[in-house]
Image (cartoon, rainbow, N blue to C red):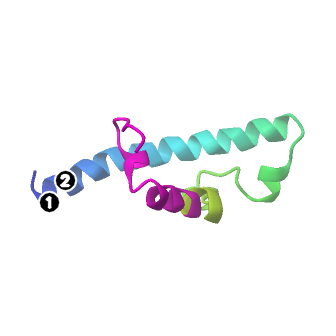
Amino acid sequence: MDASNLIQTILIYALPVLFAITVHEAAHGYVARHFGDNTALMQGRITLNPLKHIDPIGTILMPMLLYVATSGPFCSATPSPCR
């Protein structure tokens, strides 16, 4: 697969997934607010802006640490045996 085809494939899959995750997380905040937890509302996370849903530790640091700690297999689609 050449580079332009790879980039096109990634964009075709990444944009709908990003939108789905954003709607999913906004729905979590809406439901929490409905049941009395205003945390997401106070943090401005009941929105369709994907940047508002990025948490420095849970979205950036933890995946990076897991990637380094497992030498990458936690990202693969097929499970790998423990070493």
Looking at numbered disc 1 in the image, what kind of residue is underneath it?
A: Ala
Q: Residue at x 55, y 56 (%)?
A: 50
- Residue drawn 74% across and 40% down? 30
Q: Which residue is mark 2?
A: 6
In which quarter of the view is residue 71 placed? bottom left
Q: Circles 1 and 2: CB distance less than 8 Å?
A: yes
Disc 1: which residue: 3
Identify residue type, mark 2. Leu
The reply, left or right, for residue 1 in relation to residue 41 is left
SS at badge 2: helix
Q: In this view of the protein, can residue 36 be seen by the observer?
A: yes
Note whether 74 is above or below 58 in the view shown: above
Q: Secondary structure at mark 1?
A: helix
- Residue 34, given in percent of the width and then of the height, sits at 83, 35
* Residue range of the region highlighted in magenta in the rendering: 61-83
Marks 1/2: CA–CA distance: 5 Å
Residue 74 vs 42, above or below: the answer is above
